Amino acid sequence: MTKTNIIIAVFIILIAAAGAYIFVIGDDKKAVQEAADLYIKAVRDRNFDIIYNLNASSQKRRLFVLKDSSADRDELLKRAYNEHKALFDSAQPVFGFNAIWVEKFIFITDMNYKIVDVVMERNIDNPTAFYRKRIDAAVVVEVEYKKKDTAPIYDGKNIKKAVYLVKMIHIWNITRAVKGVVVDDKWLFKGIAIQKDGNIVYWE
């Protein structure tokens, strides 16, 4: 094979790989949007079974239990679930993005929301060869609150409209500490932030 043919072959392989990458990333964006939508609805409806199954913190705890070979594994799983549910139920309406279960006070019954974009992000802290483990996602969600008295309070004022960034992480990204545990191919809620303070509309 001549040098020219080798260059052409390498070029074709690179194009094919890029095309496959874009195709699979596109498929992942759909999966991210579906997972984020399911999580938002679960929080709004207080469906803790779904919340627990799609929350990165609770699933990381669950994976550590599954890694343990203890004969009391079922009891430990039940205890982990109950502890997270107790934390969720007792969470206070403090609008701080580092607060536990803050999404409980953002995704409420008296709201309308729309997912407007999904941005895939490279996870530079996880240098693995497989692309999906190197990708996190940010889901852009527009939320409008129907009533002033039930809307979350931010900076001392009730929010009427805001754009949030919902951070999503693939479950394979949290299995590094619990290697050897088989997990489903799914995306998990990792956190939430206001996209821009200046874009918030407050109730009068």
Image (spheres, grey):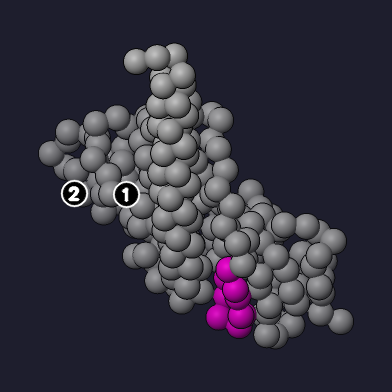
Q: Percent x, y for residue 107? A: 57, 70
* Nearer to us in this view, 58 or 71: 58
- On residue 136, the disc is none
Q: Percent x, y for residue 115? A: 58, 68
Mark nearer the viewer, 1 or 2: 1
Tell me the SS state at disc 2.
Answer: helix
Query: How dense is the environment of label 1, judged by Cα within 10 Å: few (below 14), some, or many (20 and up)?
Result: few
Horizontally, residue 3 falls left or right of residue 97, namely left
Q: Where 119 falls versus 181 (above or below)?
A: below
Tell me the SS state at disc 1.
Answer: loop
Q: Quadrant of the C terminus?
A: bottom right
Q: Where 107 falls versus 101 (above or below)?
A: below
Horizontally, residue 133 falls left or right of residue 181, namely right
> What segment carries the magenta color?
107-115
- Which label's residue is closer to the chain start, 1 or 2? 2
Query: How dense is the environment of label 2, judged by Cα within 10 Å: few (below 14), some, or many (20 and up)?
Result: few
Examine the image and state in which quarter residue 68 appears. Answer: top left
Q: Residue at x 48, y 62 (%)?
A: 33
- Give, as a three-letter code, the residue at label 1: Asp
Q: Percent x, y for residue 19? A: 45, 44
- On residue 74, the disc is 2
* Nearer to us in this view, 135 or 24: 24
Does the magenta-highlighted stretch encompass residue 159? no
Q: Quickly name the residue at label 1.
A: 185
Q: Residue at x 70, y 65 (%)?
A: 163
Does the magenta-highlighted stretch encompass residue 110? yes
- Give, as a three-letter code, the residue at label 2: Asp
Q: Where 157 falls versus 109 (above or below)?
A: above
The Cα atoms of the two marked residues, 1 and 2, are separated by 22 Å
* Nearer to us in this view, 135 or 15: 15
* Nearer to us in this view, 7 or 110: 7
Count of marks overlaid on the render: 2
